[in-house]
Image (tube, coloured by chain):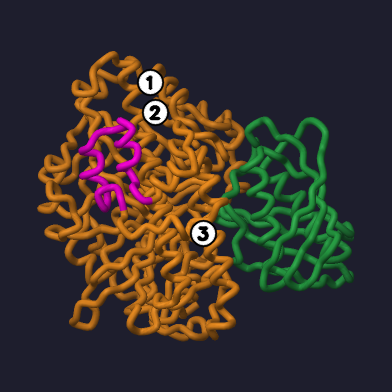
Amino acid sequence: METRRLGPFAWEVPVGTVDGMRVPGVVFASDELFRKAVDDRAVLQVANVATLPGIVTASLAMPDIHWGYGFPIGGVAATDPHAGGVISPGGVGFDIACGVRLLRSHLDWASDVRPVVRELVDALGVRVPRGVGTKGRMALSRADVVRVLREGVRFPLSRGIGDERDAALCEDGGVLADASPDDVSDRAIERGRSQLGSLGSGNHFLEVQVVDEVVDPAAARVLGLFEGQVCVMLHSGSRGLGHQVCTDHVKAMDGLMRRLGLEVPDRQLACVPLDHEAAGSYLGAMNAAANFARANRHVLADAAREAFQHVLRRSAVDLGLALVYDVAHNLAKLEEHAVGGRRRLLCVHRKGATRAFGPGHAEVPAPYRSIGQPVLIPGSMGTASYVLVGTEEAAERSFSSTCHGAGRAMSRTQAKKVMRGADLARSLEAEGIELAPAHLAQLSEEAPYAYKDVAEVVRACEGAGLTRIVARLRPVGVVKG
Amino acid sequence: MTAPAGFELLEHTADIGIRAWGPDTSGALTQATLALAELMGIRVSGPGTRRRIRVTARDLPGLLVALLDELLWIHESEGAGFVALDVIGLSERNLVAELETAPAPAEPAGIGVKAATYHQLAVEPRADGGVEARVFLDV
């Protein structure tokens, strides 16, 4: 495959790499990460996305790019509704609004938490439902699910769960306004009834972390982060409800493609023009599922607070477990961006990529507006996670987008061949990381060696000007989905 | 020589795929059903019951996706495992089958599957006269 270096952390996939490309592809990556992406066939998927009608500027990929289905994981595509632009549910993925939530605390690792960390991980393990199809902390009626779909984090708040400040510091204030529960199928609603407040399986987790290194002290101060501080990071999404929404709407669009005269190189890129009725229906359902995902993480964070209170026997005020931010990495959003010297309303698909608005942007919560939007990057199990902030340059380079994690480098079956789950658990515990896995046998699927080096990924994002590193957090307790 | 019917799992960096084959399309779909149960690690106990399922799609490969999505729905909504599938009616856009399910009370020990995808989806003839189905799953 012919590619061209655009800069130290940017590569072009030229028009013509696959038939029908409307714009080039641009991959932000270090030399090593780019080589892996080419080997992984993910770069070909960047080229495939460039064929989508109405795509503007370029089909983008972030440094954690890897092979997905249709879109690459780490893919970003902006389409123009006024130029035949399409919406593709595959550009969001099945786990709609999967994302990361970070809580800080008043607690010091060495003096407050280290002596009780095993007890704490056990208490979290009891309170955080996890695994495939597991029932969540809240059982909901059908009417309640519809309320969650409309109200996002406002629903659990109305039941006395969580803190009002949790909403203010969540992306979109914890609720997307244009949600349409009427476009969410009965099956999706049924799947949501039992799953609010559950982690799920695979790479989802809740971790007790320690701020290991502050790289940008001024930004860390604004975010309330300091070295030695205990934090809680959790990674989860919209559960079966979101998966069903994606399944339903991809199928509907797959059935419409021929009638609309649309062709795509990979059927999972099924799409319709943004002015088509099916696009409005999907966006309404996707926003509803995103509200479910935010509410899900809100309820899980409450479980973490409860476990800390139980083990440390301190009041919520004393613990100070407060939301830093909550941000999705699988979502499509209508956003204004400058293209060709003028502001245009675009539909920005981010599939395994995080929105990263720079300082001063109106959608960054007021307390953080001076430093830019916080971006939460979970590492692989047992490795560091990062807090980043968005930059002004990202607006022109990546439609204000950056990476979402380490990115897989090895298939699950390969990963399991390297080490058994029990051996991996022992090796992590030897490194001082306490574990509460859902299934020991599956643990090594998510082993650190199955992922790229998250430090290299966030450095590449900084090198490409997409985000700045604020702090590194290391795990000390892992509750695994 | 390859067995006339069977399945294997396909490697994928983030997800996982199924390659299932049989003497005809019905046989390949049956094998895909068994492959899904195996990779999810669904263990059933107690007597099985049979039910009729019906799925539609715009073509034959789409029916494979629709079938697997139907099985995932049954598993999640009822806690049921699927043990056998007999196709009784198959056209380009419609599939009717008898599905045998049994209670799966324990948490599945395998890979959590979110959904079937259309990525590199295929149902096609084999050189030996049989039919092969290929599908990737989001996990």
> Mark 2 and 1 residues: CB-CB less than 8 Å, in contact?
yes
Q: 10 Å neighbourhood of mark 2: few (<14), some, or many (≥20)? A: many
Rendered colour, chain B = green
Residue under pointer 1: A120
Q: 10 Å neighbourhood of mark 3: few (<14), some, or many (≥20)? A: many
Left or right: A435 as drawn, with respect to B123? left
Q: Give the orange chain's letter.
A: A
Q: Secondary structure at mark 2?
A: strand
Label 3: chain? A
Indicate which label's residue lies in the foreground, 3 or 2: 3
- At 79% across and 60% down in the image, what residue appears? B96
Q: Is residue A149 magenta?
A: no
Most foreground residue, A23 or A89: A89
Q: Is residue A158 magenta?
A: yes
Most foreground residue, B36 or A192: A192
Quadrant of residue B112 in the image?
top right
Name the kind of residue labelled 1 in the image: Leu
Left or right: A422 as drawn, with respect to A144? right
Left or right: A343 as drawn, with respect to B135? left
Residue B124: image tag: none
The residues bearing labels 3 and 2 have C-alpha atoms spaced at a distance of 33 Å
Label 2: chain? A
Which stretch appears magenta?
A150-175
Q: Secondary structure at mark 3?
A: helix
Residue B59 in the image, given as x and y percentages of width and height: 70, 73
Q: Identify the main secondary structure in magenta.
A: helix
Residue A201 in the image, given as x and y percentages of width and height: 52, 41
